[in-house]
Image: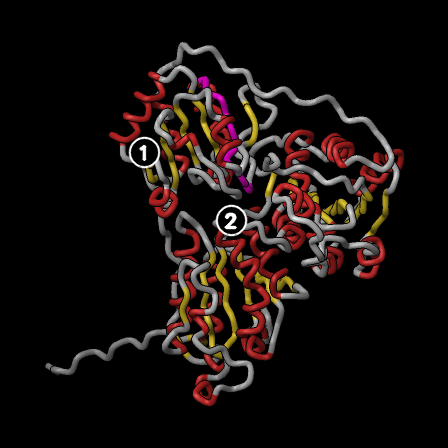
Amino acid sequence: MSSRKPAAKKSKTVTVKQATLDLLRGFGIKRVFGNPGSTELPFLSDWPDDIDYVLALQEASAVGMADGYAQATRNAGFVNLHSAAGVGNALGNIYTAHRNQTPLVITAGQQARSILPLQAFLYAERASEFPRPYVKYSVEPARAEDVPAAIARAYYTAMQPPCGPTFVSIPIDDWTHATSPIEARKVSREIGPEMDAMQTLVKALGASKHPALVVGPGVDRAGAVDLMVRVAEKAKASIWVSPFSARCSFPERHPQFAGFLHASPAQLSDALREHDLVIVIGAPVFTFHVEGHAAIFDGGTTIFQITDDPDAAAVTPSGTSIVATMKPALSALLDLLPESKRAVPKGRALPPAPKAADPLPVEFLLHSLSQAIPEGAALVEEVPSHRPAMQRFMPMRGQDSFYTMSSGGLGYSLPASVGMALGRPKSRTVCLIGDGSAMYSIQALWTAAQRKLPLTIVVINNSGYGAMRSFSQVMQVRNVPGLELPGIDFVKLADGMGCDAVRVTKATELGEALKRALAFKGTSLVEVVVDSAVPLLYAQKN
């Protein structure tokens, strides 16, 4: 009998590029967003027909589009950027994706490994450090054959709550190397709450005379708005929206909906003063923007928090935090809650419809748009100076109806609305944006027009940075340069990129212009010239 052992089977090998594309298919990623450079060409060569390459004309737009698409599809967006310069261009929207908790896998080209020691043209020094700390995971693999495994880890990390962007730097010559294929795996993402803590919360809720639930973007991100409504109705609690919430996590016409909390410590504390118990769900405790005394932390109010973000729990200054994902936490709360004997609290009263006038009041525009917007449409917003008016005159329906940026950085919402329209091709997407905001990523119009996306952009033109005008008044500073933006013609800009566009200067023109734009088969833009009166974002200092 022969003592020779049977030869070991040779493991299958493929190129790094093929292994990566197969991984994307396994993860259900059907689109790659990018702007190509020389260090990305080997990855992009002979591009497959079953994965759509979405061209953006600048890297910040590529990341914004991927962010909107990821939020629409609830799967990670895949972005391919150009080396250090491209990552630098994209950093503002990478930061926004971090604050939005949007799952993204961002790859960037790198020069060939053999010439990296020579500081070659277009190389990135310490590439993995560049996007930190605003990515959950960042690496330049030590070997070419490790690239697919790094991308797989980046995907699983991006998708694990709290979600966020990840980054992989890939040298140009890695794509043709041989490697072993990697199968996409199932990784669970839901984390249940500690039941003793939930029982304590339920006991506090039962003893409360006037509880408030403060809902944040984590509820809508988790697809748990219906659960949130059922909990609110069973608890008979008032519902407030957390400061700077980037999603709509509760129907804003619901009879228990109380309103929106300010990012001012004093104003927020005043709004919640009558509540003996405050439960913050899917949001930080709290996001402030201006200085002031937060009386809510003085001990008179019992505070609980339910969050999927351990960092948010760690920085909470008062109360009890329960770390769990939204669906299991809200399901447990719904099961544990007894029927309350409290009276159902009254919600906010909507203001009367604003009257038409010339120059056109922004409130009239927002109310008119709210009336005209199609059923099931998604609104992507970047009008920070007009957000209080929007919250009064454009109540959102709830799940998947509203998106904006959590970072405060402009240049996100126009490309994000393009990604949203790609991810929601059967319904209308509306981008409501200011003239100053629009100019940060105006080139995103081209991608939308080329693809004839069901997208309508409404530009509120008040010829300046309205939010900064307001803050200059609140802070009592004078003669601030750079706040005025005269002479920008958005109709010509949109027309030059292939969009249907019209300008509205009178109230009598608005209704027909919105109706036509929202029904247009493709991408349309309506520029609305409004009264340039300075809106008040916060109470003025004495």
Q: Earlier in the sequence, mark 1 or mark 2?
A: 2
Label 2, residues with CA under 10 Å away: few <14, some 14-19, many ≥20: many
Q: Main secondary structure of the magenta part?
A: loop
- Magenta extent: 236-246
- Based on the picture, tell me whether residue 238 belongs to the magenta stretch: yes
Q: Amino acid at mark 1?
A: Thr
Front-most of residues 469 and 486: 469
CA distance separating discs 1 and 2 = 24 Å
Where is mark 1, residue-wise?
A: 320
Residue 280 in the figure: left or right of residue 365: left
Colour logic:
secondary structure
Looking at the rendering, in which quadrant would you find the N terminus? bottom left
Q: Secondary structure at mark 2?
A: helix
Q: Can the viewer see residue 49? A: no
What residue do we see at 85% from left, 47% from top? 502
Measured as percent of width and height from the top left, residue 303 is found at 37, 30
